[in-house]
Amino acid sequence: MGEKCTAIVLAAGQGKRMKTKIQKQFLSIQGHPVLYYSLRCFQECEWMDEIILVTGQESLEYCRKEIVEKYQITKVAKIIPGGKERYDSVYQGLLACADTDYVFVHDGARPMITEDILDRAFAAVRECGACVVGVPSKDTVKVADSEGYVSETPSRELVWNVQTPQVFSYNILREAHENIRKRKMHLITDDAMVVEQEGRCKVKLVLGSYENIKITTPEDLEIADIIIKNREFRKNEEKQKKTCKSILT
């Protein structure tokens, strides 16, 4: 296609809600670190050119030896230390990119990303310059006022739970970060907000998957384990069907 794509994978979070000494992105699912799964997905995506892995200063060597080298994630071009806040880590990732066209900002603690999701996000960002992956909310959402009373009930059809990756034209996100860093950023919770506040372009919602969960609590590890087992079962089932079909024909 001629357009360079870079994944900025964030793995610098502390994961305090997990209540373990090991950071959540390094916990094990089916014998592999949580971080491994998203890196593998980007690695196996045919049109993804490179990965910038952003982690804590103390985890640089661990990521290099125990994940990138061990699992041969050859598309990792750089492993760099993150910043104090998530948006600081994203900005460091942007600075580490070299002549790229699109950036896929993804949480390393969200291991269930798939190539189908990446394909949908890529198609959307090429069309509109900015998009976020998410799923329509299954629940009714209430907006509270400052005293804890319901102030609004938005239509469920209009409410989405946002996931990652969040995907942007590199120039749009880089410029938005440069501009917004001159102001207060303490209310910024995701990359889409940076672009939204700059108002340069609209951010499109792209269908993700209800399986694309973020590992935040111990229960999430159990859910991820089940998802992986189900995926392996479906994959083996498909192989068996193809084998039977080839034998019959």
Image (cartoon, grey):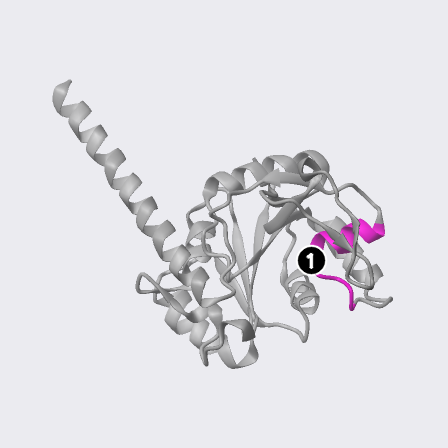
Q: Can residue 156 be seen in this view?
A: yes
Q: Position of residue 109 (x, y in %)?
A: 50, 62
* Element marked by disc 1: loop
Question: Which residue shows up at 70% across the image and 69% down it?
Answer: 88
Q: How many labels does the image show?
A: 1
Q: Is residue 155 left or right of residue 241?
A: right
Residue that extends furthest to the top in the rendered view of this protein: 249
Question: Which residue shows up at 65% across the image and 68% down it?
Answer: 89
Q: What segment carries the magenta color?
A: 186-198
Position of the N terminus, as image quadrant, is: top right
Q: Which of 110 and 172 is in front in this view?
A: 110
- Verify whether residue 188 appears in magenta: yes
Residue that extends furthest to the front in the rendered view of this protein: 149
Q: Position of residue 200 (x, y in %)?
A: 83, 45
Residue that extends furthest to the right in the rendered view of this protein: 183
Q: Position of residue 148 (x, y in %)?
A: 77, 62
Q: Mark 1, residues whose alpha carbon is within 10 Å: few (<14), some, or many (≥20)?
A: some
Is 142 situated above or below 239?
below
Question: Which residue shows up at 74% across the image and 50% down it?
Answer: 171
Is 137 situated above or below 191?
above
Q: In this view, does 119 lie to the left or right of 229?
A: right
Q: In which quarter of the image is residue 225?
A: bottom left
Q: Where is residue 249 in the image (x, y as percent from the top left)?
A: 15, 18
Is 248 situated above or below 113?
above
Residue that extends furthest to the left in the rendered view of this protein: 247
- Verify whether residue 156 appears in magenta: no
Q: Is residue 83 left or right of residue 202?
A: left
Identify the residue position indicated by label 1 in the image. 190
